[in-house]
Amino acid sequence: MLVQERNPMGYAYVCIGKKCARACDHDQLVRALCKVGTVQAVRCQKVCHGSVVGAVLDGEIRWFERVDSPRVCVALKKAVKRGSRRDLPKGLKKRRVKHLTGHPPR
């Protein structure tokens, strides 16, 4: 499913469920992502292991969980800005939610 045409700005979905918002400094994560692209708040994705963020990479939504450390936040910000899943850092690859790949937000 092609979500979005190639856009110079990235696109991300941020879960605003109870567990996700409590997991880390959620506001800071949203502000950081807003600087590199469009951010849309979505309801709980039912994979609450820390903050859950969906990023449109290569025209497909990729979901990541446990986005709570500064290093992972910076890596996700760079990936959203680039809009590609190439050269994803190892720490971010481990946080992918594989069974939700390509699924739109709930």
Image (spheres, rainbow, N blue to C red):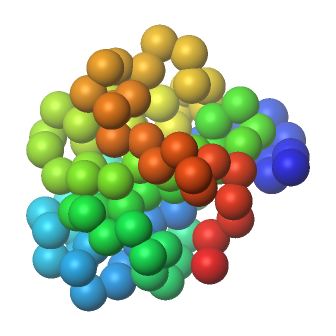
Q: Which percent across, then down, holds residue 83?
A: 61, 31
Left or right of residue 11, residue 52 in this image? left
- The residue positioned 47% from the left and 12% from the top of the image is 87
Reply above or below: 92 against 47. Answer: above
Camera-side residue of 89 and 28: 89
- The residue positioned 26% from the left and 50% from the top of the image is 67
Left or right of residue 24, residue 6 in this image? right
Q: Is residue 30 visible?
A: no
Q: How many marks?
A: 0
**Quadrant showing the C terminus:** bottom right
Q: Is residue 103 visible?
A: yes
Q: In this view, which residue lies farthest toward the top?
A: 87
Q: Which percent across, then down, holds residue 37?
A: 54, 48
Image quadrant where residue 74 sits: top left
Reply above or below: 51 against 102. Answer: below
Reply above or below: 66 against 45. Answer: above
- The residue positioned 39% from the left and 29% from the top of the image is 93
Left or right of residue 64, residue 84 in this image? right
Q: Which percent across, then down, holds residue 59?
A: 76, 39
Camera-side residue of 105 and 38: 105
Left or right of residue 96, residue 49 in this image? left
- The residue positioned 49% from the left and 83% from the top of the image is 43
Image quadrant where residue 12 sits: bottom right
